[in-house]
Image: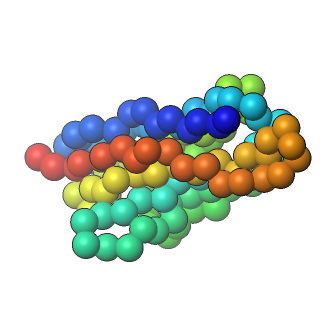
């Protein structure tokens, strides 16, 4: 059994910073890609950033220069550091991890979602 749990999020003023984390636990053999999506009210879920198991990163245009994704393989955790936040960054943020279990098969696991609200 594998679980992925997010933490962080909350209310921040425009221009502020916030950090999210997402930790996996359970019977894990390996973790491949990790990343974050977000979904704003009335909008489709969109990719924010992802990071491969070799450290290669990819960001959505809106995230470039403001967001940083990182991972700690020893802790099975992926982080998203967000800076210069704008009201349009308000959304529920979901992490994902591509986890290979002890059976050798891979599967995407999702966090429960955490609310980020940027408002004065």
Task: Determine whether 79 is above or below 88 in the image.
Answer: above
Which picture quadrant has residue 2?
Answer: top right
Task: Determine whether 63 is above or below 46 in the image.
Answer: above
Q: Residue at x 66, y 54 (%)?
A: 108
Residue 77 visible? The answer is: no
Q: Residue at x 68, y 29 (%)?
A: 26
Image coordinates for residue 56, horizontal then vertical, percent? 75, 54
Q: Residue at x 48, y 59 (%)?
A: 37
> Residue farthest to the right?
104
Image coordinates for residue 104, horizontal then vertical, percent? 88, 47
Image coordinates for residue 41, horizontal then vertical, percent? 25, 66
Q: Nearer the viewer, residue 48 or 67?
A: 48
Which picture quadrant has residue 72?
Answer: top right
In the picture, measured across the screen, residue 93 lies left or right of residue 65, that is left
In the picture, measured across the screen, residue 91 lies left or right of residue 72, that is left
Image coordinates for residue 57, horizontal then vertical, percent? 68, 55
């Amino acid at each position: 059994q594998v679980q992925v749990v997010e933490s962080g999020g909350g209310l921040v003023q425009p221009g502020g910073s916030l950090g999210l984390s997402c930790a996996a636990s359970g019977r894990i053999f390996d973790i491949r890609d990790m990343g974050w999506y977000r979904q704003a009210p009335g909008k489709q879920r969109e990719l924010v950033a992802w990071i491969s198991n070799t450290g290669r990163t990819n960001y959505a245009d809106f995230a470039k220069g403001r967001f940083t994704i990182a991972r700690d393989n020893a802790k099975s955790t992926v982080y998203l550091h967000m800076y210069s936040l704008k009201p349009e960054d308000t959304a529920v943020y979901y992490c994902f991890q591509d986890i290979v279990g002890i059976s050798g098969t891979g599967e995407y696991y999702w966090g429960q979602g955490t609310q980020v609200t940027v408002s004065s």
